[in-house]
Image (cartoon, coloured by chain):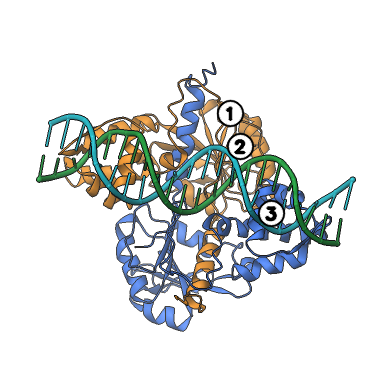
Chain colours: A blue, B orange, C green, D cyan
Amino acid sequence: MTDRTALGGNVRTGLTAGVDRGIPDATVARLPLYLRALTALADSGTRTCSSTDLAAAAGVNPPKLRKDLSYLGSYGTRGVGYDVEYLRYQIARVIGQTQDWNVVIVGVGNLGSALSNYAGFSPRGIRIRALVDSDPERIGHEISGHVVRPISELVEVVRDEHVSIGVIATPAAAAQDVADQLVAAGITSILNFAPTHVKVSEGVDVRRVDVSIELQILAYHEQRKTNGTEVSA
Amino acid sequence: MTDRTALGGNVRTGLTAGVDRGIPDATVARLPLYLRALTALADSGTRTCSSTDLAAAAGVNPPKLRKDLSYLGSYGTRGVGYDVEYLRYQIARVIGQTQDWNVVIVGVGNLGSALSNYAGFSPRGIRIRALVDSDPERIGHEISGHVVRPISELVEVVRDEHVSIGVIATPAAAAQDVADQLVAAGITSILNFAPTHVKVSEGVDVRRVDVSIELQILAYHEQRKTNGTEVSA
DNA sequence: CCTTGTGAAGCTGTTCACAGCC
DNA sequence: GGCTGTGAACAGCTTCACAAGG
């Protein structure tokens, strides 16, 4: 029942003690941001940067950046800043970017197809290895270089392609069933695009991406801006 | 520079005092969840529910649900629970679901096209009113019932269609420019799918949806599961 | 009985100021 | 002098236990 949603409120998986480095969830969620900013800096030929530079590129404030980095270790030089390439590697190592992560997408409708064709995954070590669907109409078709396979082959797909992350890109009505099948196939990390809550067993991480909710949150704040709520004194 | 990201770390817009009802950001982010769960309950014929029922449907724990609802008012009945339809309406009213919100999508690549065709928006009061792109190849084509218009017409589009929310579905390289144009056209709420941080002026809300980051966060936890980090005592 | 609504406690995350080091 | 790294203060969120009320 562990539920790491994309909207905060994450739950630590049940590892009680030990050598737990314990990087806070909020920090973990920002490390990919720093990685991306560092890669951009490296690409533009920057060798060294200060916390102010990097924070600006990542869209956070400098103290927060420094605090976050302090959880990983002391990789900067006082009076100088951070070596871009070195810090980039250290963050990559911590968040597991030194290896590839194989992904199966379940559901090849509009969204699943768009995801399977997204160019931004490979530079971040994310490999879409298989597409599956339950609709016989879609099975066998080739999408973005993958032949769509029946969902009944999920166990084989996960095993043969060494898949560790499953993406649910189906309608809401199918999401729970798909989640159950993913878990049964041995998947313990799920990204759920379906607009519904999926229940999973202990130890399985679920993150949620819900565009409607994001827009609804924006609408709430928009409503407050346009209504006369800014009475200020 | 207000930045309401999808990954927590939100900043309150600069309204200092007044009748500020002050619903916490974390609660606001969950209200659409409750709304969705209530709608599902109503559709299944349920007239009344307890906080336990609703919490289970929404994927939160009952005390958190009750605390969240307490920020809106006292809409339940002790010893009984909540009237599904009444509570649904109250939440809808608070988050602005009693009116429609018009959206323009900038960028009609894979993602923009998929979004423009998504059926889940209209039941939540979200209306995709226009698609714009900068690519002359795409302008004039019809996608999901909308003729793609040039981004140079953004001001007219926003004015004529009463658009209040802009969606950036372009490559990262174009995102900042698009954001600037959206803000120049009067938009103060932006949903950014491009994998980059966009800087906007004070008072503009930006939320981010970044699939790569979600997968990277899952990968981090997956790495910790498979590595021998669970030394427990 | 039942279930809501809520102060209070506890926890997580953020900010700040400055000590430490180059 | 400049910038990092961090303890300590602060703010926000979650949890809990129980009072309030049907």
Q: Residues within 10 Å of mark 2 (few under 14, many from 20)?
A: some
Image x and y of residue D10, in percent: 57, 38
Left or right of A44: which side holds A192? left
Q: Which mark is residue A212?
A: none
**From what the image shows, is residue A27 above or below residue B123?**
below
Out of A214 and A78, give the one closest to the viewer.
A78
Q: Which residue is mark 2?
A: B2
**From what the image shows, is residue B32 above or below residue B209?**
above
Contact flag, marks 2 and 1 (Cβ < 8 Å): yes
Could you tell me how far apart the alpha carbons at marks 2 and 1 are, in whole angstroms?
9 Å
Name which residue type carries label 2.
Answer: Thr
**From what the image shows, is residue C8 above or below residue A94?**
above
Out of B17 and B160, give the one closest to the viewer.
B17
Could you tell me how far apart the alpha carbons at marks 3 and 1 are, in whole angstroms?
26 Å
Q: Mark 2 belongs to which subunit?
A: B
Image x and y of residue B187, in percent: 58, 31
Left or right of B201: which side holds A135? left
Q: Mark 3 belongs to which subunit?
A: A
Residue A123 picture quarter: bottom right
Contact flag, marks 3 and 2 (Cβ < 8 Å): no
Secondary structure of the residue carrying numbered label 1: loop
Q: Which mark is residue A66?
A: 3
Q: Residues within 10 Å of mark 3 (few under 14, many from 20)?
A: some
Comparing labels 3 and 1, the label whose residue is closer to the camera: 3
Comparing labels 2 and 1, the label whose residue is closer to the camera: 1
Task: Specify the quadrant that holds the C terminus of chain A.
Answer: top right
Name which residue type carries label 1.
Answer: Gly
Q: Which mark is residue B14?
A: 1
Image x and y of residue A34, in percent: 66, 57
The residue at the point 75 percent across, 67 percent down is A86
